[in-house]
Image (spheres, grey):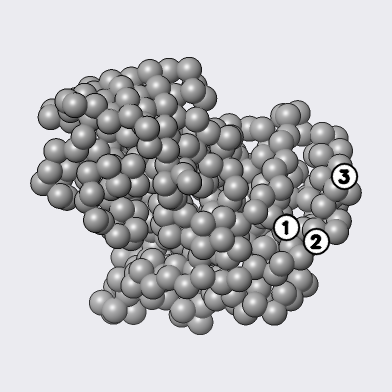
């Protein structure tokens, strides 16, 4: 029996910048998915989700097309197997596996990426594929594109596979340069789940990506071929030339360009534990996601306000949006009081059942010891 754990993630700042070749700053958190697997002597896979009480099967010798699989968790597992086999030109070992998780589904904490990462590490270990963590992350991303139909960036998979305990992961999505950034030891990470489910594949996520590409194309006409993605547009250029871009692509681009600048500024603020600056940048990010990117909602706004009212250092939407959760940074000494006051305030302004998770920053996916 082999056990693999893979963490979920929250993003401190840098939302919807990953597929625009920009900067992100996620943290792997102590909410995770675990896979307990027993190898088979054939190429058949039987996967049972303890969380969903569902079972699915497929054969590695002829992995079904996405449309031939039921929707749900099996598409992510089959997608990872498909991507690994295509990359290595090897047939993987069949498994009987049970999946269990304490990651809340639909909260924007990348339960799908954790599931992908767990199975990637499982087969990488079981079949001695010797693939490095970045390659595994890229193959998981490919699996999600093809088998889940979500054109996600690389951030979620990278965070679940590459993170270091006690640190955030700075990632340049163009160069794939990574750097671990220590978190202030007296700050706690709180995931504040609004209770409103997030259905990413059915959302307007792919539309937002297309609108960003539209904006980059319009700016390329004006600024030249060096504008490959919105990452290449400076805030100064944006101030001059964004008015030439049609709405709503203009506002989508304004968010991405401003968010990239905020990530770089946030790194300095984090290293100096500059709480006022962290608060300002997180709130500016949330405001931009609400007004320019239009991925927030009444419940997410109410949760951010509840967290700030309860004394958070900073708070903002985390994940793709369209429901889900917020992240708050809180002084550990104030954590118990914060949790009580934030829940009380949120209940007064929203009808969904909130959940709060105080989390540690943990390392990326690994075989359980």
Please provide percent x and percent y for residue 245. 42, 65
Could you tell me if the residues under marks 2 and 1 are in contact, i.e. CB atoms within 8 Å? yes
Of pointers 2 and 3, the one earlier in the residue sequence: 2
Q: Is residue 227 above or below residue 63?
A: below
The structure residue drawn at horizontal position 76% and vertical position 71%, both measured from the top left corner, is 275
Could you tell me if the residues under marks 2 and 3 are in contact, i.e. CB atoms within 8 Å? no
Q: SS at mark 3? A: helix
Mark 1 to mark 3: distance in Å?
16 Å
Which residue lies under the disc numbered 2? Answer: 331
Mark 2 to mark 3: distance in Å?
14 Å
The crowding category of the residue bearing disc 3, from other C-alpha atoms within 10 Å (few below 14, some 14 to 19, many at least 20), is some
Which residue lies under the disc numbered 3? Answer: 341
On screen, residue 138 versus residue 306, left or right, reads left
Q: Nearer the viewer, residue 174 or 255?
A: 174
Give the residue furthest to the bottom: 236
Q: Which mark is residue 293?
A: none
Q: Is residue 98 above or below residue 14?
A: above
Q: Nearer the viewer, residue 154 or 368?
A: 368
Q: SS at mark 2? A: strand
Q: Nearer the viewer, residue 299 or 335?
A: 335
Q: Can residue 26 be seen by looking at this rendering?
A: no
Which residue lies under the disc numbered 1? Answer: 188
Please provide percent x and percent y for residue 104. 58, 35
Please provide percent x and percent y for residue 253. 46, 63
The structure residue drawn at horizontal position 42% and vertical position 54%, both measured from the top left corner, is 161
Quadrant in the rendering for residue 131: bottom left
Mark 2 to mark 1: distance in Å?
6 Å
The crowding category of the residue bearing disc 1, from other C-alpha atoms within 10 Å (few below 14, some 14 to 19, many at least 20), is many
On screen, residue 197 versus residue 238, left or right, reads right
On screen, residue 5 versus residue 154, left or right, reads right
Please provide percent x and percent y for residue 336. 85, 48
């Amino acid at each position: 029996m082999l056990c693999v754990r893979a963490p979920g993630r929250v993003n401190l700042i840098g939302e919807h910048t990953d597929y625009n070749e920009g900067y992100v700053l996620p943290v792997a958190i102590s909410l995770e998915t675990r896979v307990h697997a027993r190898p088979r002597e054939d190429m058949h896979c039987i996967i049972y989700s303890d969380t969903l009480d569902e079972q699915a099967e497929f054969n590695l010798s002829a992995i079904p097309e996405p449309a031939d699989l039921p929707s749900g968790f099996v598409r992510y597992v089959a997608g990872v197997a498909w991507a690994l086999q295509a990359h290595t030109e090897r047939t993987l070992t069949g498994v009987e596996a049970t999946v269990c998780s304490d990651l809340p589904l639909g909260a924007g904490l990348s339960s799908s990426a954790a599931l992908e990462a767990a199975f990637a590490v499982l087969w990488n270990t079981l079949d001695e594929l010797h693939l490095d963590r970045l390659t595994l992350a890229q193959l998981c991303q490919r699996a999600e594109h093809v088998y889940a139909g979500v054109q996600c960036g690389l951030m979620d998979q990278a965070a679940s596979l590459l993170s270091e305990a006690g640190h955030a992961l700075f990632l340049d999505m163009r160069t794939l340069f990574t750097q671990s950034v220590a978190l202030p030891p007296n700050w706690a990470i709180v995931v504040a789940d609004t209770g409103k489910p997030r259905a990413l594949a059915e959302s307007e996520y792919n539309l937002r990506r297309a609108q960003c590409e539209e904006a980059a194309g319009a700016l390329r006409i004006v600024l030249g071929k060096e504008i490959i993605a919105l990452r290449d547009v400076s805030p100064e250029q944006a101030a001059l030339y964004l008015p030439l871009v049609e709405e709503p692509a203009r506002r989508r681009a304004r968010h991405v360009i401003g968010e990239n600048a905020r990530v770089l500024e946030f790194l300095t603020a984090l290293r100096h534990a500059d709480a006022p600056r962290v608060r300002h940048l997180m709130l500016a990010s949330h405001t931009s996601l609400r007004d320019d990117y239009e991925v927030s909602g009444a419940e997410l706004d109410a949760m951010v306000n509840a967290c700030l009212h309860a004394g958070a250092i900073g708070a903002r939407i985390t994940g793709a949006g369209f429901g889900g959760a917020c992240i708050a940074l809180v002084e550990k000494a104030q954590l118990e009081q914060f949790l009580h006051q934030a829940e009380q305030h949120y209940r007064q302004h929203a009808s969904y059942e909130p959940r709060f998770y105080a989390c540690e920053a943990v390392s990326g996916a690994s075989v359980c010891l």
